[in-house]
Each structure stands twice: as structure tokens, then as C-alpha cells.
Amino acid sequence: MELTVAITGASGTIYAKRTLELLAASGVVETINLIMSGTAATVAQVELGVNLRDPDRAVFNEWLGLAADSKLIRYWRLDNLAAKPSSGSNKQAGMIVVPCSMGTLGAIASGAGTNLIHRAADVCLKEGRKLVLVPRETPLNAIHLENMLRLAHAGARLLPASPGFYHRPTSIAELVDHLCYRILDQFDIPHSSKTQWTGEEAE
């Protein structure tokens, strides 16, 4: 399976990191086309203390704990509109934008493809491929909500960064995992069943 993952400047870089780790460990994802917005590196530095300002495959492999020679991650510059994810002829399962800023969400909703994230998302919509957007913003204004509705009508899947608590999380890591497992569920990618609802009453 080939997927595109985009990281934008919304708060929640930890969701991006964990999603990438889970995709890498899944055994079914062979290629991840990775794109970062201009402010994503700033947020990653603030939230996780990681320097992604001059990224390449080696930087991402180290960040995600992958082997130094791993070719799983292929990084594409934001301004490279000739990159693989920008073409519908590139066969892939779909795209995840995690976290997804309201600016990116609005640009995708408007069809204004001014960078590779916007263009790659538009390609998924026009080709009928899965597009999963993980917005992380609160409160939401009417413009945010209208853009989300427009994207839902266009076929995107909106998966807000709002983890559940029925699995009785005891750490931030468990809250993050819960959300990231739901992201993987959209592509039927295997993961731990620890947070899945069983229908059984808690003791």
C-alpha cells in the first residue's frame, strides 16, 4: 500500500508522529509520501522539541525510529507540484492530513491548489480515493464548519482530534494511540485492538 501523509501547522504534531510510526509498523504500507507545510516544523519544534526544518529521509528515519537505510518515507517539498502525489495517475490508497489546520482545510475545500498538500488532497477527491483530514481546532466558527461540510459532501472523511475515554486511558500516549488507531481504521490497516469497543460493561 502507498499513502500520502501531510503534516500542517496545527497543534498536534504528536498525532502525526504516532500515525507515521503505526503505518511503518503495520506491515502493509510500503511507501509513505510525506509532505510538510511551512509552519509544521515550527510547531514540531515547540511541541516535541524536534528539528524538522531541513528534512530529508535520514532525518525522518531517525525521528520515527526506522532503520537508517529505510526507504519507507519519501519526502516531497511543499512547492514541488510535479511530485508523485500531485498526479491522479499515481496509484495510491489515499491521503491523511494530520493534524489539519483550518487554513489547509479551507484551501482544500475551495479547490485552490496553491501547494502540494492542497493539490494532493484535490487529486484524492477527484479520483475517488480516501482523504482523511484530522482537524485540531477549538472553538469552531461558522466558516470552519461550512468548509468541513463542503469537504464531507465532496467525499472527504473528517476525523477530528477528539479521542475517546471508554478504554480508560492512563497516559497521553494512550489518548494519542486511540485517535491514531481510528485513522488507520479508515484504510483497514491492522493495529492493536486495545482501544476497540467490545460492548461489554466496564467492571
Image: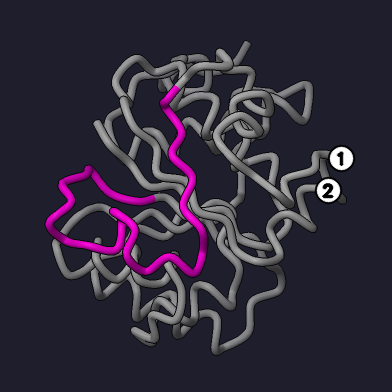
Q: Position of residue 67 (x, y in %)?
A: 56, 13
Left or right: where 165 falls relative to 50? left
Q: Which residues are magenta?
A: 71-95
Could you say which is closer to the camera, residue 127 or residue 191? 127
**Label 2, on which residue?**
45
How many neighbours does mark 1 have within 10 angstroms: few (below 14), some (14-19), or many (20 or more)?
few
Q: Main secondary structure of the magenta part?
A: loop
Can you tell which quarter of the image residue 142 is in?
A: bottom right
What residue is shown with label 1? Answer: 49
Magenta segment includes 76: yes
Q: Which mark is residue 1?
A: none
Question: Answer yes or no: do the residues labelled 1 and 2 have beta carbons within 8 Å?
Answer: yes
> Up-down: is 131 above or below 81?
above
Q: Splitting the image into 4 quarters, where does residue 17 fall?
A: top right
**Secondary structure beneath label 1:** loop
What is the x, y in percent for residue 165? 64, 33
Quadrant for the C terminus in the image: top right
Q: Residue at x 44, y 81 (%)?
A: 114
Does 178 sit above or below residue 118? Answer: above
Asked whether, in this view, residue 75 is left or right of residue 171, the answer is left
The quadrant holding residue 119 is: bottom left
